[in-house]
Image (cartoon, helix red, strand yellow):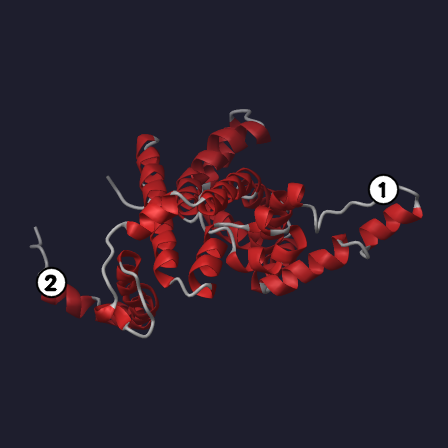
Amino acid sequence: MQGKLSWRAKLRRDRSLLLMTLPALALLIVFSYVPMFGIVTAFQSYDIYSGFSASPFVGLAQFERLMTDPVFWHALENTLVLSAVQLALYFPVPIALALLLNSILSSKIRSFVQAVVYLPHFFSWVLVITIFQQMLGGAGPLNTALREHGWATWDIMTNPETFKYLVTGQAVWKEAGWGIIVFLAALAAIDQNLYEAAAADGAGKWRRLWHITLPGMRGVIVLLLVLRLGNSLTVGFEQMLIQRQAVGRDASEVLDTFTYFYGVVNNNFSYGAAAGLFKGVLSLILILIANKVAHLFGEDGLYRK
């Protein structure tokens, strides 16, 4: 039996792969881990001119102020509502589209449709919102057609009551194509012999879908769901900021915009850092809970048990 390799032997064996990961690792360290040292400002009365060392330490005072701020709780409520709506309406869409695309027999048509659906992923939020404004705004073709037929116009772009559905629709149109690619890869990994055996036993397409396709995709679905829950408190800073004036602050204020306006814009960096740290800790708790639930269903989640 071959002995266990030493770490030097593993390093020599995998040196090419490790060298390939160095640029990504450097970006991760510079842009993700180094800025985490700024968390200390959440426990200070930070002054930009005094710096970290000279700013007075105030302990949990910023968090106490945060817990008594009604604007913060309103931003948290908006964030949770938007996250729940996007999880319910956005997450199933790529799965359904991937199943539909996979049923298309012609590879050329499937590739064309996949490219068209994936294209909006490369658009900026400015362009996405502009397209929605041109289509659904007061001067858009939808409201123009409604006026021509004497019907009431649909004020969707400036209606605070339907704003959560508007931003969810924008997210679906922009990002569903990326999810389709992931789920199509999961579908390609399913053993085709299982379908042939099920068809030979008399199983119809719906039974094959329920007993073969969806169980084969379950691991990927659970993994992406865990990641989605961990990122659920980030509901689109640019998307909210651009549409803030159209629908008002009450409808568009989320944790990210709260941190920006009440922290950065007001030069109250400690208060903004406290809000950002609260969001980070809550996101970590959500992702750990989701990962634990994945283990209960027999899936690996982000890591094995």
Q: Please state the horizontal and vertical placement of residue 248, each as a whole percent of the image.
A: 63, 51
Q: Position of residue 183 (x, y in %)?
A: 49, 47
Closer to the camera in the image, 208 or 14:
14
| Image-based side of 68 in relation to 58, left or right | right
- Where, by quadrant of the figure, is residue 85 drawn? top right
Disc 2 residue type? Trp
**Mark 1, other Cα within 10 Å: few <14 / some 14–19 / many ≥20:** few
Helix, strand or loop status at disc 1: loop
The residue closer to the viewer here, 237 or 198, is: 237
Give the percent coordinates (x, y) of residue 211: 48, 29
Q: Which residue is mark 2?
A: 7
* Residue 114 percent across, percent down from the top left: 60, 55
Residue 140, relative to residue 22: is it above or below? above
Q: Outermost residue toward the bottom?
A: 49
Residue at x-position 23% and y-position 59%:
57
> Residue at (34%, 71%) from the top-left corner?
48
Residue nearer the viewer, 305 or 229? 229
Q: Give the amino acid type for the residue marked by disc 1 in the picture.
A: Ala
Q: Secondary structure at mark 2?
A: helix
Marking on residue 152: 1
Q: Residue at x 28, y 73 (%)?
A: 50
Residue 30 can be seen in this image = yes
Disc 1 versus disc 2: distance between alpha carbons?
Answer: 71 Å
48 or 252, which is in the foreground? 48
User: Left or right: 283 with respect to 125?
Assistant: left
Of the two numbered discs 1 and 2 on the same chain, state the one appearing first in sequence.
2
